């Protein structure tokens, strides 16, 4: 009986030793598993983002409300001040009306208080326009009443002067 002799026939190959891999793992399943691991963190980030957004909206609304209240108080104060002005012709009429100067200053100050949010600035400008219009009508009524009173005084003076002329003229 012959003893078998083993002769190695090794050669260099590109194959890995061991069992052959017949099925590859799905990369989408691995990616989904990693995404599932990050769900709690993403939920926390989303909640923090929503909180920050809500906080920003509340802060913007508070700034808008504060600016509108200040503007309304300012308009009412300017109306009272201008009603005390003896030169009622320069309040709403003329080359440089006092009302326009006062309200443009109030608008500028209010926009500074509102901030940079363009929607809040747009709302403030719109509501301030309503306040300004209401104040303008109130002042217009005041000025018209002053004009009527002054016209009546002028008519009375004219009549008195005519009456004095008639009385003092020699016949």
Image (cartoon, rainbow, N blue to C red):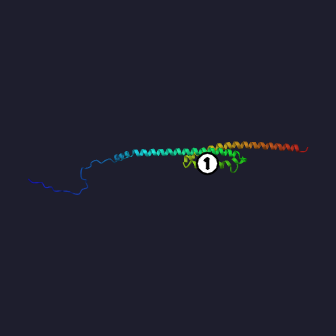
User: What is the quadrant of residue 40 in the picture?
Assistant: top left
Mark 1: which secondary structure?
A: helix
Residue 105 percent location from the top left of the image: 63, 50
Residue found at x 60% / y 44%: 69
At 84% from the left and 44% from the top, the residue drawn is: 162
Residue count near mark 1 (Cα–Cα under 10 Å), binned few <14, some 14–19, many ≥20 = many
> x, y (%) of residue 27?
34, 48
Residue at the spot 69% in from the left edge and 43% down from the top edge: 140
Residue that label 1 marks: 107
Left or right, residue 32 beside residue 146: left
Q: Quadrant of the C terminus?
A: top right
**Up-down relation of residue 141 to residue 14 (above or below):** above
Left or right: residue 168 compared with residue 30: right
- Front residue of this view, candidates 70 and 168: 70
| Quarter occupied by residue 3 | bottom left
Q: How many marks?
A: 1
User: Left or right of 55: which side holds 35?
Assistant: left
Camera-nearest residue between 119 and 20: 119
**Image location (x, y in percent) of residue 128:** 61, 45
| x and y percentages locating residue 164 in the rendered image | 85, 44
């Amino acid at each position: 009986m012959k003893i078998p002799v083993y002769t190695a026939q090794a050669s260099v190959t590109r194959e890995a030793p061991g069992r052959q891999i017949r099925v590859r793992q799905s990369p989408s399943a691995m990616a989904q598993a990693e995404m599932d691991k990050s769900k709690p963190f993403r939920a926390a980030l989303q909640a923090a983002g929503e909180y920050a957004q809500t906080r920003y909206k509340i802060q913007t609304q508070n700034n808008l409300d504060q600016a509108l209240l200040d503007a309304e108080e300012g308009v009412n104060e300017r109306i009272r001040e201008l009603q005390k002005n003896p030169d009622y012709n320069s309040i709403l009429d003329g080359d440089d009306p006092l009302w326009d100067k006062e309200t443009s200053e109030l608008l500028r100050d209010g926009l500074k208080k509102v901030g940079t949010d363009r929607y809040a600035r747009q709302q403030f400008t719109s509501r301030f326009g309503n306040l300004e219009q209401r104040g303008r009508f109130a002042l217009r009524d005041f000025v018209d009443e002053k004009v009527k009173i002054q016209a009546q005084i002028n008519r009375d003076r004219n009549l008195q002067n005519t009456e004095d002329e008639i009385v003092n003229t020699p016949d």
